[in-house]
Image: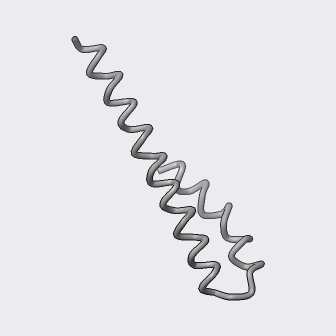
Amino acid sequence: MTLFTIGIPHCLPLAKSTTSKSKAKLLWFSELSIMVRYTSLVQEVHTYRTINRSE
């Protein structure tokens, strides 16, 4: 969850600086999807390493 908390403050100033709210929302969602993908990737790697260690 640390990645998630780092990501939110990072895109808040960007959202405030954009004039249209829809653009800010779109930016936030794209940022969020990147975070989710990265987190799942890290979890996959961690699981893979754990499986290899147990064999």
Q: Is residue 6 above or below residue 14?
A: above
Residue at the farthest right position? 17
x, y percentage for residue 34? 52, 55
x, y percentage for residue 47? 32, 30
Q: Is residue 40 above or below residue 24?
A: above
Picture quarter with the C terminus:
top left
Residue at screen point 67% across, 70% down: 12
Q: What's the colour scheme?
A: one colour
Residue at screen point 68% across, 61% down: 10
x, y percentage for residue 44? 35, 36
Residue at the farthest bottom position? 20
- Return the residue nearer the eye: 44 or 5: 44
Q: How many marks?
A: 0
- Return the residue nearer the eye: 54 or 38: 38
Tell me if 53 is positioned left or right of 12 in this view: left
Q: Is residue 24 above or below residue 5?
A: below
Q: Is residue 20 above or below residue 16?
A: below
- Return the residue nearer the eye: 6 or 52: 52
Residue at screen point 60% across, 58% down: 7
x, y percentage for residue 51? 26, 21
Residue at the farthest left position? 55
Tell me if 27 is positioned left or right of 38 in this view: right
